[in-house]
Amino acid sequence: MSSTFTTPRPAWLPTFDAPPLTEVVLGVQFNAIALRPWQYAQFLEMFPDHRTIEEQPPLQSDFETFDAQPTFSFHLQTGPTSPRIWLRSGDNTDLIQIQSDRFIRNWCKATECTYPRYEKLREQFLHDYKKFLEFTARNNLASPQPNQCEVSYINTIEVPEATNAHHAMERIFTFWKDVPTANAESQFENATVQLRHIITSMPNRARLAISVDPIFRANDLRPFLRFTLSIRGQPAVPLNEESIISFFNESRNLIVQRFAELTTPEMHKLWKRTDAA
């Protein structure tokens, strides 16, 4: 097996023992295949540890583009839609999503849950995706041909001793400097931030999307910030499991680097950064 599948964590990558990470998404989009309702049932039987099943609206096919047009991506929908199925593990930390043109695996933080690290999530994705490929071959379905991949890291940030994280942007983010937030007539409430970068170092260009959104915890309305870093783009040819994992590996490295660059030493101490910054 190629070393791409087992590439260890780079020694130079920033490391946090207590990151504010609450969700990681590894996903692949491919040419639509004709999944029938009874075939979904067959697929569910392959995951006995994921017994919580939900039907969700399907995701539209989404392609990153890099021409001179002002739009960043385009959506494509042809023919009748098929459902998107969620399969949750008993402890709610693992979520598998399938639809006619998607296979997605989410890690979701649960109470008292420790982040298992990307290398473990990569291993789990590859194991389950291979089961999906076996399922399509056994049912004489078209072989999935990857056309887009996605890696997303979703963080939920609070600030100790701050009553409102929405008002502590300068303590969290290195880019939030000298931003006027109040005057005699007004008081700063919150901010939403969106940044986009075209990644030219990948074999096919990809896009890094960064967002900061003010949110409130449902049970007590405590203010938090959701800090999301996502990379989407086309994997390199040949389009196979190795090119998917190679895209994941490079995306993870870029996301963790940008996370460390965009957040402050004060937060790094809180999140127990262990490498030499």
Image (tube, rainbow, N blue to C red):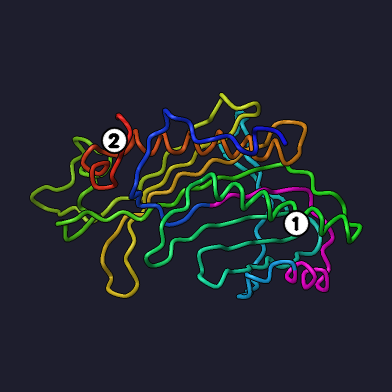
Tag shown at residue 255: none
Q: Nearer the viewer, mark 2 or mark 1?
A: 1
Q: CA distance from mark 2 to mark 1?
A: 43 Å
Percent across and percent down for residue 62 are 65, 48
Identified at 82% across, 55% down, the residue is 134
Amino acid type shown at disc 2? Phe
Find residue 175 and report its image quarter. top left
Q: Position of residue 227 (x, y in %)?
A: 38, 49
Give, as a single range, the part of the protein colored magenta. Answer: 25-45
As rendered, which of 50 and 152 lies closer to the eye? 50
Say the numbered circle drawn on residue 175: 2
Verify whether residue 12 appears in magenta: no
* Residue 112 image point, x, y percent: 37, 65
Q: Earlier in the sequence, mark 2 or mark 1?
A: 1
Q: Secondary structure at mark 1?
A: helix
In terms of image quadrants, where is residue 110? Answer: bottom left
Image position of 182 (left or right of 17): left
The residue identified by callout 1 is 131
Q: Position of residue 125 (x, y in %)?
A: 63, 51
Q: What residue is drawn where x is 83% and y is 57%?
A: 136
Residue closest to the far front = 1
How many residues crowd around disc 2 within 10 Å: few (fewer than 14), some, or many (20 or more)?
few
Q: Is residue 43 inside the magenta stretch? A: yes
Above or below residue 186? Residue 196 is above
Residue at image x 65%, y 29%? 204
User: The N terminus appears in which quarter of the rendering?
Assistant: top right
Instruction: Tell me what residue is drawn at x 50 percent, y 70 percent.
Output: 91
Q: Residues within 10 Å of mark 1 (few under 14, many from 20)?
A: some
Q: Amino acid at mark 1?
A: Lys
Q: Looking at the picture, does residue 201 appear above or below residue 36?
A: above
